């Protein structure tokens, strides 16, 4: 028999042996008992009122965590900050620079910075007394809402608030304390959007001037096939860096809430 045929026959036998060993070994491994975790989720009768209260507190905490992003957007400075930062990026024409994750992260930390005095007040007047057991859950909720309502009232325009008060078709409030929170929140949000768009317009003006100058220069030189945005982008970035644009914008944003 030729050596090549002998080698081919031996390789075939070796492959069969390896395959058989794998199958037999796998069968042996699967034949052994494998411990599986047992997970049970059950609803039973509470042994004491304390267990029921604890369960309700956990359910309430999970609900708050689920609604936390919406609450952050609705009742804090996040809306104005993130809209203005988006206007800055669009005015520069840098497409996705800075990325969305960077803008949202910056807006988030600026929101915590702006809302810090109100969060400290909530912690001192609502959270800590509730943990210590000196006030009830209802009293803690009222104490926690008051600083947020005060912040929203300062940033809400009267005509926006009057719009939602009239659409609510209820009794006309005699004082800010009589305005329901569900009426105040949408008025606050549209006021924040209007303020953000006003700031965005002011940001756009110098960059539009640069675009117009570049476009006029290229047209006078007969370079009508060259996109003006390609030439104006470096000049806009240079202007933004020279005037320390991020410093000016962040300072103006934070001062707008004071």
Image (spheres, helix red, strand yellow):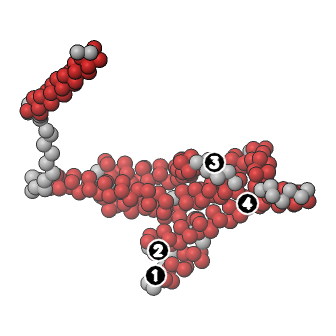
**Residues tagged 1 and 4 counted as in contact (Cβ below 8 A):** no
- The mark nearer the N terminus, 1 or 4, is 1
Q: Can you tell which mark lies on residue 70?
A: none
What secondary structure is found at the residue carrying circle 4?
Answer: helix
Q: Can you tell which mark lies on residue 204?
A: 4
**Residues tagged 2 and 1 counted as in contact (Cβ below 8 A):** yes
- The mark nearer the N terminus, 4 or 3, is 3
> What residue is shown at x 15% (from left), y 30% (from top)?
23
> What residue is shown at x 17% (from left), y 23% (from top)?
17
- The mark nearer the N terminus, 2 or 3, is 3
Label 4 vs label 3: CA separation? 17 Å
Residue labelled with disc 3: 97
Tell me the quarter of the image containing the N terminus.
Answer: top left
Residue 212 visible in this rendered orientation of the protein: yes
- The residue closer to the viewer here, 62 or 24, is 24
Q: Is residue 256 left or right of residue 63?
A: right
Query: Residue 247 at x, y = what percent?
Result: 69, 46
Of circles 1 and 4, the one toward us is 4
- The mark nearer the N terminus, 2 or 1, is 1
Residue labelled with disc 2: 183
What secondary structure is found at the residue carrying circle 1?
Answer: helix
- The mark nearer the N terminus, 1 or 3, is 3
Using the image, determine if residue 30 lies above or below residue 226. Answer: above
């Amino acid at each position: 028999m030729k050596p090549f045929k002998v080698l081919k026959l031996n390789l075939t036998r070796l492959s069969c042996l390896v395959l058989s060993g794998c199958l037999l070994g796998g069968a042996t491994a699967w034949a052994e008992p494998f411990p599986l975790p047992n997970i049970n989720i059950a609803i039973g009768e509470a042994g004491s009122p304390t267990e029921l209260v604890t369960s309700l507190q956990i359910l309430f905490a999970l609900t708050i965590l689920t609604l936390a992003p919406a609450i952050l957007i609705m009742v804090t400075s996040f809306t104005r900050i993130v809209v203005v930062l988006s206007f800055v990026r669009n005015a520069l024409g840098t497409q996705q620079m800075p990325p969305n994750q960077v803008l949202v992260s910056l807006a988030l930390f600026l929101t915590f910075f702006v809302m810090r005095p109100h969060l400290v007040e909530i912690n001192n007047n609502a959270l800590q007394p509730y943990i210590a057991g000196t006030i009830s859950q209802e009293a803690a909720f009222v104490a926690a809402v008051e600083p947020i309502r005060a912040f929203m009232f300062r940033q809400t325009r009267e005509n926006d608030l009057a719009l939602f008060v009239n659409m609510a078709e209820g009794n006309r409030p005699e004082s800010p304390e009589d305005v329901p929170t569900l009426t105040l929140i949408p008025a606050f949000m549209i006021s924040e959007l209007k303020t953000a768009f006003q700031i965005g317009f002011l940001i756009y003006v110098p960059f539009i001037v640069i675009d117009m100058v570049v476009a006029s220069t290229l047209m006078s030189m007969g370079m009508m096939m060259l996109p003006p945005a390609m030439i104006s982008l470096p000049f806009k970035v240079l202007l933004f860096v020279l005037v320390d644009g991020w410093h000016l914008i962040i300072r103006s944003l934070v001062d707008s809430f004071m």
